[in-house]
């Protein structure tokens, strides 16, 4: 068997070697023809398809190799492009990162600057708060001082006004008219001074000259006084008490009748007590005058009586309207009634202004003056 197959294997190997070693188809064909001649036509015909297939496979391999080489080149080109692209991207990213870094640095600087500014602002705010507190304290102090100044101004203005309006005297001077009198530590009051009726320095405590003032008054009104200095008035029991308590006074009673006769009665020690003693007529002293009789003496030591305060010795109230009709130091009820009802004609009535017990008077003035030394 080996001896039969040997020539075929030999020829096949020879043709394969020839086909492998020839550069082109013609040379291959020549080689195959030579091989056919050498190996015998019979043998060659048997392996010829196989040789053709091998040749086709060889060509196909070569084509594939060429394609692979082309693809390798493409891959290299793409790799190069990709590398270049990556480098660009990295450069861009780096530049972007640098920008970010720069921005962060600037922002950091800004934050530090802002922190410093805030520190300064907070410090300034604290200083401003201190200043505001100091200002508030100063404002309060100024307000208090302004208040004190205002009060002082008011006080000064009051004093100035008081001085400007009228000088304050302890008693009436030789100057007639209305003056502010301050006989003691109590408040001053206005009084009418008279230097013509009975000489200089008299103060009018009661006046009946025109009948325009009603003397039918209650206790409180007689205590405070009423009327006007240019007409009829009563100075007030409390003021008369203060004056006569402060220093000894004399009393001058001026009277004018409707028939034109003018009379007076003068007492050298006039004084009344306080309200707690019902303003009692405590003193009159010695008297003299053109009025014939002393009709006031019987009223000495009598308390003052008004229609709403009966201090007299009568079983009724002497001050009532159907009796004497005024306020006076009534006894039972007495002979003088200088605060009685004013009649503008001569009449005999129990409630009229009278001195003799009955006859109305046209004009009456009661004046007081501090006693001169030596009297
Ligand atoms: Ca009585």
Image (tube, grey):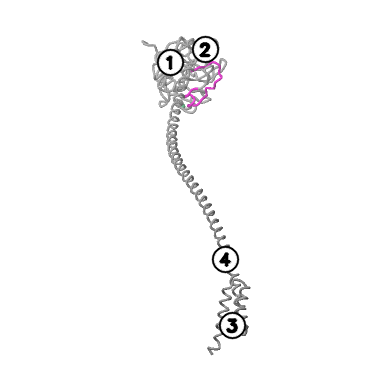
Task: Say which element carries label 3.
Answer: helix
Q: Quadrant of the C terminus?
A: top left
Q: Is mark 4 within 8 Å of ligand 1?
A: no
Mark 3 is surrounded, within 10 Å at the Cα level, by few (under 14), some (14 to 19) or many (20 or more) other residues, namely many
Distance in Å between CA atoms under marks 3 and 4:
39 Å
- Magenta span has 81? no
Task: Say which element carries label 1.
Answer: loop
* The magenta segment: 206-225
Task: Name the outermost residue toward the bottom.
Answer: 1
Mark 4 is surrounded, within 10 Å at the Cα level, by few (under 14), some (14 to 19) or many (20 or more) other residues, namely few
Residue tagged 2: 256
Callout 4–callout 2 Cβ contact below 8 Å? no
Q: Residue at x 52, y 14 (%)?
A: 363
Callout 4–callout 1 Cβ contact below 8 Å? no
Nearer-N-terminus badge (4/1):
4
Q: Residue 39 shows which numbered tag?
A: 3
Residue tagged 4: 69
Nearer-N-terminus badge (3/1):
3
Distance in Å between CA atoms under marks 4 and 2:
166 Å
Distance in Å between CA atoms under marks 4 and 1:
149 Å
Check the image and report above or below for 367 versus 63. above
Mark 1 is surrounded, within 10 Å at the Cα level, by few (under 14), some (14 to 19) or many (20 or more) other residues, namely many
Nearer-N-terminus badge (4/2):
4
Residue tagged 1: 171
Callout 3–callout 4 Cβ contact below 8 Å? no
């Amino acid at each position: 068997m080996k001896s039969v197959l040997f020539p075929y294997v030999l020829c096949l190997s020879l043709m394969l070697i020839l086909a492998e070693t020839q550069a082109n188809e013609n040379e291959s064909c020549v080689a195959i023809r030579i091989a056919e001649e050498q190996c015998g036509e019979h043998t060659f015909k048997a392996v010829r398809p196989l040789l053709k297939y091998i040749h086709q496979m060889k060509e196909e391999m070569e084509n594939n190799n060429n394609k692979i080489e082309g693809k390798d080149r493409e891959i290299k080109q793409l790799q190069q492009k990709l590398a270049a692209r990556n480098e660009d991207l990295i450069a861009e990213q780096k530049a972007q990162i640098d920008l970010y870094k720069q921005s962060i640095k600037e922002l950091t600087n800004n934050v530090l600057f802002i922190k410093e500014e805030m520190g300064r602002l907070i410090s300034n705010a604290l200083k401003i708060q201190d200043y505001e507190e100091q200002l508030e304290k100063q404002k309060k102090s100024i307000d208090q001082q302004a208040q004190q100044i205002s009060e002082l101004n008011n006080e000064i203005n009051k004093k100035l006004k008081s001085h400007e309006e009228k000088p304050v005297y302890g008693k009436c001077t030789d100057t007639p008219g209305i003056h502010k009198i301050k006989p003691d530590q109590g408040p001053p009051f206005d009084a009418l001074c008279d230097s013509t009726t009975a000489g200089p320095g008299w103060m009018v405590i009661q006046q009946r000259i025109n009948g325009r003032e009603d003397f039918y008054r209650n206790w409180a009104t007689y205590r405070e006084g009423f009327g006007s200095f240019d007409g009829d008035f009563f100075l007030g029991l409390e003021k008369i008490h203060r004056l006569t308590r402060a220093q000894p006074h004399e009393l001058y009673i001026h009277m004018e009748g409707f028939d034109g006769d003018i009379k007076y009665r003068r007492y050298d020690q006039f004084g009344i007590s306080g309200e707690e003693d019902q303003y009692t007529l405590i003193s009159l002293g010695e008297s003299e005058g053109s009025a014939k009789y002393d009709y006031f003496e019987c009223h000495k030591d009598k308390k003052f009586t008004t229609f709403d305060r009966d201090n007299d010795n009568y079983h009724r109230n002497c001050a009532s309207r159907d009796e004497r009709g005024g306020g006076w130091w009534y006894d039972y009820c007495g002979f003088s009634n200088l605060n009685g009802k004013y009649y503008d004609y001569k009449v005999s009535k129990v409630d009229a202004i009278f001195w003799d017990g009955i006859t109305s008077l046209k004009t009456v003035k009661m004046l007081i003056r501090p006693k001169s030394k030596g009297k």
